[in-house]
Amino acid sequence: MEKSKIKSEVVTPEIAVEYATRLGVAFPKLSDPFLALLVEKVIECGFTGPQLERGINQVIKNHMYGEPTIAEVLATRPDPNKRLCRFELTLPGVESEREAPYGQYLIDCNRYGKENMRFIEFIEPEY
């Protein structure tokens, strides 16, 4: 797969089809309807190019018995609530920048109030 096609945006149907085809080559018994449904589900779940490449490669390398399932591929997508982000807590007299899972940011928003929080950015994982 060309690295120029792999971006951190939701995959296009064309890219998803390329990866599904790759899975089909590794597991020739997978049917065309299975691969079509896989394409539909990875787009619906919001896979990015790097996430889909990592997921398909992980299933190809690690699947042991029979044929893989769609759920097995979908389970490789990182949990967005565990995605790291950078944010700042801006309470009077306290200013601290933190890196933490996005779920922690949401908890801190409830704890300290959204007005005391400043979201900075998501930190993309290295694949």
Image (cartoon, helix red, strand yellow):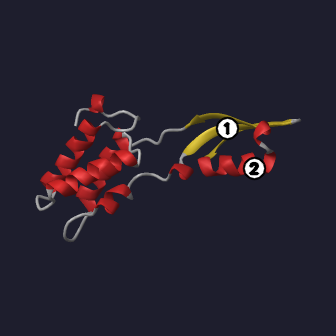
Disc 2 secondary structure class: helix
Q: Are marks 2 and 1 in contact (CB under 8 Å)?
A: no
Count the labels in the image. 2
Q: Quadrant of the C terminus?
A: top left
Label 2 and label 1: CA atoms lie apart by: 14 Å
Quarter location, residue 26: bottom left
Residue 70, picture quadrant: bottom left
Picture residue at 26% right of the left edge, 53% below the top: 37
Q: Is residue 95 left or right of residue 106?
A: right
Residue visible at 20% across and 41% down in the picture = 18
Residue placed furthest toward the right: 93
* 105 sits to left or right of 55: right
Image location (x, y in percent) of residue 87 = 67, 38
Residue pictured at 56% horizontal, 37% vertical: 122
The residue at which mark 2 appears reads as 110
Mark 1, residues whose alpha carbon is within 10 Å: few (<14), some, or many (≥20)?
A: some
Give the answer, above or below, for where 118 lies relative to 36. above
| Residue marked by disc 1 | 87
Mark yes or no: residue 110 visible.
yes
Mark 2 or mark 1: name the one nearer the start of the chain.
1
